[in-house]
Amino acid sequence: MSFFNLSEPIFRNKQDALDFQDRQGLLQFKITIKDKTLFSVFYTRIDQVFVIWSLISAVIFFTAQFAPIDWITQAIFWSILTVIGTVGMSLLTYFWVRVERLRWVLYTWVILMLGGVIVTDLGIFWGLGKVLMHLCDMWLILSAVGYMATAIGLRSRAFVVSGLFHLLGIVILPYFMGWQFVITGLIMTLNLLVFAETQWDMRPPTDNYDLLTEEQKIFNQEQFLLRQINYQ
């Protein structure tokens, strides 16, 4: 039996047949005129995390590239944004990762993000040249590790591709000397937006007997069958 679910596309259009845990905190945006839908999109809490981190990544790396702000001020600014993003990620995803038994993936991301902030701040405040020269590399590596951990937890090829994409970014950075922050920001931001706007492959959802009622588990089973029918 394959570790990954090879019957699913790596990326596909979002589907409405969401499990109970995905419907919690769901944000929906729709534009209709005379009962005709012109635009419709939804964001689960996981999608919302991707959007939040895409905005944070863009702000941090584009500011580093273009804004005439000293490094100390930027370090403080980056640290605050990253901590806000980490707390927001934890609050938004905690129920989902508990149901899916993936708390270790969330903890991995928290450790990676906070660890990256600490190393970045030490490099800036102590003037550590080697750290400052490789900030972009470091954050791409941290992201790649996080995505690979997520790939293992979710059994998802999409997150493997994402991890490799970030490692590829490290390879191409030397060809963009002077523009490394904006390239890093683009890699991280575009990757996150792809995940926010698409449906990615993963193992079938688990039935967490401690958190889901019998009705909720039956509902998830029905939604899973609907998804199987829709992409056959």
Image: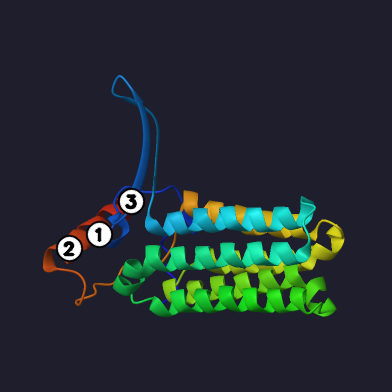
Q: Is 183 left or right of 81, judged from the image as shown?
A: right
- Amino acid type of disc 1? Phe
Asked which quadrant contains residue 212, the reply is: bottom left
Residue 216 image point, x, y percent:
17, 63
Marks 1 and 2, how far apart at CA: 6 Å
At label 3, the amino acid type is Leu
Give the image location of residue 33, x and y in percent.
34, 21
* Quadrant for the N terminus in the image: bottom left
Q: Which mark is residue 216?
A: 2
> Which residue is denoted by mark 1 in the rendering?
20
The mark total stands at 3
Dot 2: element: helix
Q: Residue at x 29, y 51 (%)?
A: 17
Q: Earlier in the sequence, mark 1 or mark 2?
A: 1
Question: In the image, what residue occupies the spot 62% across and 58% down?
Answer: 57
Q: Position of residue 61 (x, y in %)?
A: 70, 58
Tag 3 residue: 26
Sequence-wise first label, 3 or 1? 1
Label 3 crowd bin: few (<14), some (14–19), many (20+), radius 10 Å: some
Residues at marks 3 and 2, CA–CA distance in whole angstroms: 16 Å
First of labels 3, 2 by sequence position: 3
* Vertical relation: 33 (above or below) 106: above
Secondary structure of the residue carrying tag 3 is: loop
Residue lying furthest left: 214
Residue extending farthest to the top is 34
* Figure quadrant of residue 228: bottom left
Q: In x, y percent, where is residue 214?
A: 12, 68
Report helix, strand or loop for mark 1. Answer: helix
The answer to whether the residue labelled 1 contacts the one labelled 2, judged by CB atoms less than 8 Å apart, is yes
